[in-house]
Image: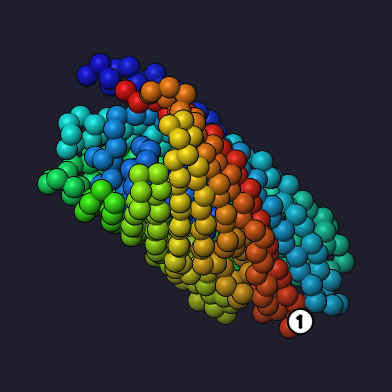
Amino acid sequence: MSHVLSCRPQIRLALTLALIAAAGAAQATDGYFANGYGMKAIGMGGAAAAVALEPFGGAVNPGAMSFLDSQWQLGLSWFSPDREASRTGSGMAGIDGSVTSDSSNFFIPEFGWNWRWRPDLAFGVTVYGNGGMNTDYPGGQIPAQSACAAFNPNPGPYNLLCGNGKLGVDMMQLMIAPYVSWQFMPGQSIGVAPTLAYQRFEAYGLQAFDNPMLSTAPGSVTNNGHSSAWGGGVRIGWMGQFSPEFALGAAYATKMWMGAFSDYRGLFAQAGDFDVPSSFTLGAAYRPTEAWLLALDFQRIFYSGVRSVGNPSALIMNCAMGDRNACLGGSNGAGFGWRDINVWKFGVQYRLNDQWTLRGGYNYTQNPVQPQDVTFNLIAPGVVQNQWTLGAGWKLDAVSEITGMLMVAQRNSVSGSSLFVGFGAPGTTTETVSMKEMQIGIAYTRRF
């Protein structure tokens, strides 16, 4: 019990830091999921389902945590996404333009705590976040004397989506996941992590869509400040250590059922609903020698299970033709059109000596944004695919360690025909979104 009491200040500090920084968090690597949780895992490309290196089972695989000793870890990373959007080919419509998002520096905290109460039983908590649907484009690229005047009754100039002023969204999700992990027989462990989720959202510059023709709730589409919601779900996991060299892991996270964003019930499908998608992960780990560790994860994320994310944006055309269910905010309203994606994560770790451990990794993510949905995704360009990582750990003494990591996601772009073509713009009107990222993080781990 003394171990638990001694860690309470660290738990309170980490929760406070997470809540303070969550409002500005933006982390879009695997869609809008992070590519990994915990600095060691991120340094290995996010591969962590079949290894127990750090106390982040609530975000990855709670079944692995009974193999981890008692420890807590507090980390902070600097995340820098570079988002660009453009439109060309509109001709006489005059709605061409190009913008770069102003918001490019974010600080993201994370915390994990694992208490191995018995050799076969561990308790813990993980605090982590998702985000990435975060953009802040300047307005005024499109002149008042353009086709935007047909979509927006307010005088110009206009932003890239024919709205007024700045254009963008701010989307944040904070998860608090306590867990229990139990080795029901030697080398075989299961775990469960009920998860409390908090999210908040803001949209601005979407005045062209804030009207009865396109939304079920005009006035609840844009520029209403931040709206928040609570909800939750559960993550379950298993890990099998079949020999000192080889292990397998699997985890499944249910959809997190969230309350609606009432201030944006005219934007998101089902009157402001924005649940967190379900996912599953399979992992394998192999230690050919005591110094080397190889890890491979496969993850499937079901974005299509959340209508506000997965519904095709082209449904807004059905709305314009009279199908109210397809309107923004409708029961089957237009969304971002994100498809379900596969993610592959590969990592390697090498223990150089008793003090230093080196890591590297690669993460490949299918792009969830399809060409026909580029228009809506100007404000949510989660399109990166190839991510490269490096990491290192330095033992300060017998119970404490510093971990660092670097992630670079190379630029990826998606182009497609503009939705404005359906509203009178010429067929040559094309839009492009692109994104690249960098992340640098550091964490402190202490065993107890």
Residue 265 visible, this angle = no
> Looking at this view, is 70 or 335 the one in front?
70
Q: Tell me where residue 347 appears, x and y as whole percent.
A: 46, 53
Residue 263 is left or right of residue 254, and the answer is right
Q: Which residue is mark 1?
A: 428
Is residue 227 depicted above or below 111 in this figure? below
Q: Secondary structure at mark 1?
A: loop
Q: Residue at x 55, y 67 (%)?
A: 367
Residue 94 is left or right of residue 364, and the answer is right
Q: Residue at x 50, y 42 (%)?
A: 358
The residue sitting at the bottom extreme is 427
Is residue 301 depicted above or below 356 in this figure? below
> Looking at this view, is 335 or 20 the one in front?
20
Q: Tell me where residue 215 appears, x and y as whole percent.
A: 56, 64
Q: Quadrant of residue 383?
A: bottom right
Label 1 amino acid?
Thr
Q: Tell me where residue 221 appears, x and y as whole percent.
A: 59, 55
Quarter of the N terminus within the rendering: top left
> Looking at this view, is 217 or 430 the one in front?
430
Residue 266 is left or right of residue 303, and the answer is right
Category of crowding for the residue at label 1, using alpha-carbon neighbours closer than 10 angstroms: few (below 14), some (14–19), many (at least 20): few
Q: Tell me where residue 353 appears, x and y as whole percent.
A: 45, 35
